[in-house]
């Protein structure tokens, strides 16, 4: 629903977007533009932070020192992405506390993909290749979005995600070209479990995506969920098949006329179950975030007390 902003301001706002100008925090914007951005950026920030958990669980079990260092760097990057994104959302007038309260109370969403378990080491590699790959596809679009702070955060995040994608793909290629039969089987098993949830990351079909029309009208999204999913499928399927892997989709076919890969139906019942909090790992993920929040309380209190002390001593000395 578009708010009742004065027509002239709305017209100027839309003209700025049409000219490709960025909207900045102090600028006039419709309430609905602000609300949509807070919704999307905060969900995105939560996804980065919750997204540390599935891979973070494997840091103590990495097969060698190099893999451990790479994985630690990747997981730390995701924490950094969460920081950029929480900051970007704060420029719209919501506080970090409000966003975290919404996450911990189960009111805020985060990406469905992080509610699936990482059962084997190869899952870490698939997250790098396919999950980061899907995230990059979506975020490259968001780097063009009309809101300046979000768009700029995306530029930096995409550069880091590209490294994540490459390290995941490098692992899969290595296991499939020089690995043992057991390693190849581990990789195929991971693909079987991550393929469909990864395709769900792009969101519901365009016909079932209530937010898309207004997001596209105001240049927050510039491409649709299905459009991005299809481009991703077309790019990645040949690479996966070239390694001798099987995509777990009996209906998969290459359409010679459109030169695109056609997939079978996505299980949207499963998607909505996960989004509503009933996925395999939803409860565990939120419990882990709650514990981290509780364990970090003393740090937040210490920082607040120090800031107060500095402010009062400046006041006392008249500086
Ligand atoms: N999971 O109307 P639409 C990453 C919800 S970052 C959960 O189509 P929209 C990095 C949606 O919120 C991954 N919920 O929604 C990493 C809406 O509900 P609401 C996260 C979903 O916003 C890698 C309802 O369904 N990326 O992976 C999902 O137009 C590795 C209707 O849907 C972002 O957040 C879903 N998959 O399009 C980290 C990017 N899909 O809010 C660690 C920014 C939809 O009205 C390791 N977000 N829903 O109650 C976006 O681009 C969009 O929000 C979409 C959804 C494309 C996700």
Image (cartoon, rainbow, N blue to C red):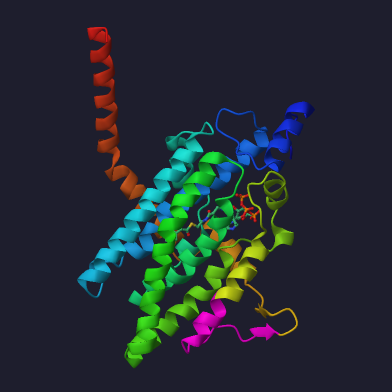
Q: Please give the count of numbered marks on the rendered protein.
A: 0
The quarter of the displayed image where residue 310 is located: top left
Examine the rendered structure and indicate whether residue 213 appears above or below residue 299.
below
* Residue 234 drawn at (x, y percent): 61, 75
The quarter of the displayed image where residue 178 is located: bottom left
Q: Residue furthest right?
A: 7
* Residue 153 drawn at (x, y percent): 47, 46
Examine the rendered structure and indicate whether residue 182 appears above or below residue 44.
below
Magenta stretch: residue 239 in it? yes
Examine the rendered structure and indicate whether residue 176 appears above or below residue 209.
below
Magenta stretch: residue 136 in it? no
Q: In front: 315, or 302?
A: 315
Q: Is residue 182 left or right of residue 144?
A: left
* Residue 3 drawn at (x, y percent): 73, 33
Q: Is residue 123 shown to the viewer in this render?
A: no
Q: Tell me the quarter of the image containing the C terminus.
A: top left
Q: Is residue 182 shown to the viewer in this render?
A: yes
* Residue 285 drawn at (x, y percent): 40, 57
- Identify the residue at horizontal 25%, vertical 64% (top origin): 69
Q: Is residue 295 left or right of residue 150?
A: left
The quarter of the displayed image where residue 124 is located: bottom left
- Identify the residue at horizontal 56%, vertical 27% (top origin): 26
Q: Tell me the quarter of the image containing the N terminus.
A: top right
Q: Residue furthest left?
A: 65
- Identify the residue at horizontal 66%, vertical 57% (top origin): 223
- Range drawn in magenta: 236-255
């Amino acid at each position: 629903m578009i708010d009742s902003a004065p027509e002239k301001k709305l017209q100027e706002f839309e003209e700025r977007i049409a000219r490709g100008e960025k909207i900045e925090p102090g600028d006039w914007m419709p309430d609905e533009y602000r609300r949509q951005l807070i919704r999307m950026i905060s969900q995105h920030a939560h996804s980065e932070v919750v997204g540390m958990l599935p891979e973070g669980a494997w840091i103590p079990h990495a097969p060698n020192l190099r893999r451990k260092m790479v994985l630690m760097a990747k997981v730390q990057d995701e924490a950094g992405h969460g920081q950029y994104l929480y900051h970007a959302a704060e420029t719209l007038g919501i506080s970090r506390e409000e966003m975290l309260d919404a996450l911990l109370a189960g009111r805020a969403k985060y990406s469905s993909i992080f509610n699936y378990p990482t059962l084997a080491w190869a899952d870490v590699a698939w997250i790098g290749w396919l999950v980061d790959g899907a995230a990059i596809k979506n975020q490259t679009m968001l780097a063009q979005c009309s809101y300046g702070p979000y768009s700029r955060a995306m530029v930096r995040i995409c550069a880091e995600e590209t490294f994540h994608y490459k390290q995941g793909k490098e692992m899969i290629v290595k296991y499939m070209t020089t690995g043992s039969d057991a390693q190849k089987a581990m990789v195929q098993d991971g693909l079987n479990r991550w393929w469909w949830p990864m395709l769900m990351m792009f969101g519901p079909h365009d016909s079932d995506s209530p937010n898309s029309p207004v997001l596209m009208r105001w240049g927050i999204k510039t491409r649709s969920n299905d459009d991005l999913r299809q481009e991703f499928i077309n790019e990645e399927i040949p690479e996966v098949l070239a390694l001798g892997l099987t995509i777990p989709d009996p209906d998969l076919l290459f359409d010679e006329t459109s030169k695109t890969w056609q997939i079978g139906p996505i299980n949207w019942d499963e998607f909505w179950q996960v989004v509503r909090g009933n996925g395999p790992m939803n409860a565990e993920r939120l419990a882990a975030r709650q514990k981290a929040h509780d364990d970090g309380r003393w740090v937040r209190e210490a920082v607040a007390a120090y800031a107060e002390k500095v402010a009062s001593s400046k006041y006392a000395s008249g500086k």
